[in-house]
Image (cartoon, helix red, strand yellow):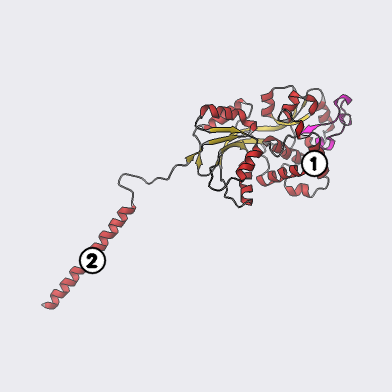
Amino acid sequence: MVGRRIGAIAIAVALIAGALLLRRAVLDDDADASPAGTVATTEPAAAAAELVCITELAAACDAARAEHPELRVTVEDAGATLDRLAALPDGEDAPLWLTIEPYPAMVDSLRSASDLDPLAAETQDVAATKLAVAAPNDGRADALVTACAATPLWRCIGDNAGNEWTDLGGEAAWGRVRPSLGVVDRQAVALASLASAVAGYFGNADIRSSDWQNDPAFTPWMGRLAGAVGESVLSGGTPLGTMAVRASALDLAATTDAEVAALGGDQSVLYPEPSMWAEAVLAVPGGSGAPDDLTATLASAATTAGWDAPGSAQQSLPNESTMLALRTLWQETV
């Protein structure tokens, strides 16, 4: 009888212990679960407080400033923003950036070289515009097209930079051939135009730094192109802007369809081959956010300012490593 009682007691103790363990497991599960009727959510991206625009898209920034007073809006040359974002300490907030491709990737490439975290920006397409060369509407463009019939336009321009226009069948009164790309290490379109010029030299849009490093004739060609017109001469900001207000300063201006449309001057416009386009994007840093309608606002304003719709580009600029190499090439040349 005593043995049976001891066995019964042991069974009861085991049942009680099992019940306690089960209750604890249930309570622990309840503590980890979301309250009834709720769904676990992730934190929304923090809204950016600043928008920076390249100078070539200042009109779009004006529209954004009017539509989004909550944003601090500034305009500066792409090269200045590139250098600033490349050196931004880890953990500091990066601005929204209205720029052209591949500048956002160029930032991360420079940051990686400095052992800094990437900004990992998401890019949203805004607009596009074709790269071009403008000349006074006095016959110079015709002379250039005739003389360069068998040579890519920029290759021919670099070959003849600093020579007399008479060498190209032009008039003696025109003086020397004076092309300008702009301030290449600071202006987005100027760097894009350098890419177009180098592509013209090689006759191929798919250029790499090894192309010019292995070509001994390239350095003198580049020197002629870069040295024809000093950057200090560009009183109008860009080559085309300077041509519009000071025609005697230069006679071949690297530009875009958008700038030609905006300035509305009397120029002849030529399109180099291989053709290249500048593609405007809004770069939103990783972990940040932008107002839902900001891209639409920027796109509308860019179109009004003469840019084409996003997706119009038929040939993009080279990748970030080539563009950075071109920027360095220019800095070493001028």
- Seen in the picture, residue 148 relative to 210 is either above or below; the reply is above
- Which residue: 81% across, 22% down? 138
Instruction: Give the image location of residue 269, x and y in percent.
Output: 74, 27
- Position of 317 with respect to 30 (left or right) is right
- Which residue: 76% across, 47% down? 211
**Highlighted range, magenta:** 156-180
Q: How many marks?
A: 2
Q: In the rendered structure, find residue 260 and report the number of the disc placed on it.
A: none
Q: Amino acid at mark 1?
A: Met
Residue furthest left in the image: 1
> Mark 1 — residue?
222
- Position of 37 with respect to 317 (left or right) is left
Instruction: Give the image location of residue 83, x and y in percent.
Output: 64, 42
Q: Would residue 151 be seen by someone viewing this image from the given angle?
A: no
Quarter of the figure that contains the C terminus: top right
> Mark 2 — residue?
17
Q: Which of the 4 image quadrants contains residue 9?
A: bottom left
Q: In this orientation, which residue lies closer to the viewer: 82 or 178? A: 82
**Label 1: how many Cα within 10 Å (few below 14, some 14–19, many 20+):** many
Q: Amino acid at mark 2?
A: Ala
**Label 2: how many Cα within 10 Å (few below 14, some 14–19, many 20+):** few
Instruction: Give the image location of residue 178, x and y in percent.
Output: 81, 31
Whether 230 is among the magenta residues is no
- Position of 17 with respect to 87 (left or right) is left
Distance from the alpha carbon under mark 1 to that under mark 2: 86 Å
Q: Which of the 4 image quadrants contains residue 4?
A: bottom left
Q: Secondary structure at mark 1?
A: helix
- Seen in the picture, residue 83 relative to 266 is either above or below; the reply is below
Instruction: Give the image location of residue 79, x and y in percent.
Output: 66, 39
Q: Which of the 4 image quadrants contains residue 92?
A: top right
Mark 1 near mark 2, Cβ–Cβ under 8 Å? Answer: no
Quarter of the figure that contains the N terminus: bottom left
